[in-house]
Image: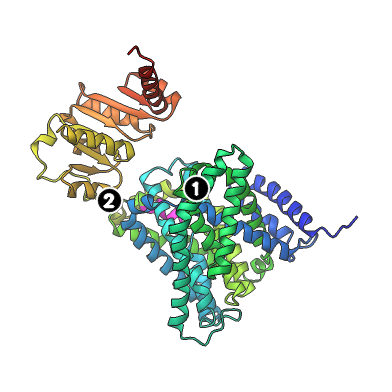
Amino acid sequence: MDHNITLISTIAAGFGLALIFGFIAERLKLSALVGYLIAGILIGPSTPGFIADVGIASQLSEIGVMLLMFGVGLHFSIEDLMAVKRIAIPGAVVQMTFATILGMCLTHWWGWTIGEGLIFGLSLSCASTVVLLRALESRGMLDSMNGKITVGWLVVEDLLTVLVLVLLPPLASLLGGTNGENSTDPLWQTIGITLLQVAGFLVIMLVLGKRLLPWLLWHIAKTGSRELFTLAVISTAIGIAYGASELFSVSFALGAFFAGMVMRESEFSHRAAEESLPLRDAFAVLFFVAVGMLFQPAVILEQPLNVLAVVAVIVIGKSIAAMAITLAFRYPLNTALIVAASLAQIGEFSFILAGLGMALGLLPAEGMSLILAAALISIAINPLLFTAIQPFKKWLVGVSKFAEELEKRTDPFAELPMSTERKYLEGQVVLVGYGRVGKRIAKALQQNDIPFVVAEENREIVESLRKQGIPAVSGNASEPSVLIQAHIANASMLVVATPDTIDVRNMVNTAKLLRPEIHIVLRTHNEVEYGLLREEQVGHVFFGEDELAKGMCKFILAQYAPK
């Protein structure tokens, strides 16, 4: 029997150790990514014992990169970004610039070249999507306003990093790279050709891909074969990534990202995400294991101060930049602290960028090891930063008058303008939430000339509504001050159009305290919560699936009614 089975041994060792150390990391309340990276370190060439094939692991990690970026594209939402664009875009740009400059200052002190410093700094500037989403989900903050700001911020960081991945190869030789694209053409011409190639790829994806991919998935889905559907999704992701690289000189990562973005437009996007998730997760694990194999543990013992300096850039430098820009946009101190904690880590995009830097001769192996060490530490302490937010805020407000003012200062959209018409302040409907359901309710109220005031957490939505002449106040309606500003004491009805039922009781208590006879209308997606709210008789409760079933039954029975 042939025992030269390095592919199988590499996968077996990678998956096996990743499972063990990922489980240990989760039990220690750390991200499983820490365990995957440690698994890679243990089977890498820098540690004794079994050594996996680095070349094979590297190719497997490329597939991991494709599927990771495909997943990012599938979940990329222009709507989510546009909802918080005013803070997310400048915030991400300022934070990435600040972190990159700090990283370049460090490397200049160490005697690195400008090109090496630039790649190193950029690698420190982009946070991990995986770590962030898990952190927000575990704390129930993903759908909150603070969560949406942070996710939108990260989306901009991802897009900027993708742009860097596109421009880096043609710029490599200028930055001092040894493996870049050697060309005698002027720089502007090289960049122009690169951007034209990317534009050509995008046009084909948006024109042909937008029609072809949904058509393909529709016909595959009609076969009823789950295996074929999964195969279609995965082969599309990898095939487009490879084709983009070969035909348009576009990176695998960018090709897979836009494949996911285009597939998101299909009605099968949710199923595509669900069906491809197990394979995406598996290869993502191999990606982190392969990255861990590049780590040289000796760097922690030989350069402890350098490691601490890099961690300080990520955890302190990036946090200060995030807090400063958030406070500059007049968001409260609590929001600034949550955004700062969320982005005080690095992950998969940092590894992709650093890997490209190494391939282009723009980042020494020492740089990758420092990035990996800092990633491990920043990911490990990220949960502690979230836990420390409230105690730190309490202490800061207690010792600093300035912090106290930041916490107390009013949102410019938290009060109704003095010019608000009288009809909106007497017998009006107070509508909490202006999402998909809230918009439909507001439209119906407008069409029937029923006055209403919107209470919405998203400040940009509130500003937009006011420009349309619709009275709106900014803030969380579970806080009495927000409902008071919406003149709940004079309202005839409170309509809670948000699916989050955690703070509903606070809203109901405030409304009934100030207006005992008020009518209350609620919505929920949770059947258990629906039953509890009905039992408590807090108001008229609508359960999404129940209302859908009633509507369908009404239609069905109408077809069989006597003519």
- Residue tagged by mark 2? 460
Q: Is residue 491 left or right of residue 229?
A: left
Magenta stretch: helix, strand or loop mostly: helix
1 and 2 marks in contact (CB < 8 Å): no
Q: Quadrant of the N terminus?
A: bottom right
The answer to which of 325 and 431 lies nearer the viewer is 431
The residue lying furthest to the top in this view is 562
Could you tell which of marks 1 and 2 lies nearer the N-terminus?
A: 1
Q: How many marks?
A: 2
- Residue tagged by mark 1? 215
Residue type, mark 1 in image: Trp
Residue segment shown in magenta: 336-343
User: Magenta segment: does it hold 544?
Assistant: no
How crowded is the residue under tag 1: few (<14 C-alpha within 10 Å), some, or many (20+)? few
Q: Is residue 378 above or below residue 561?
A: below
Find residue 224 and report its horizontal and vertical position in percent.
59, 37
Residue type, mark 2 in image: Glu
Q: Is residue 287 left or right of residue 442?
A: right
Q: Is residue 243 left or right of residue 340?
A: right
Find residue 555 and report its horizontal and vertical position in percent.
36, 22
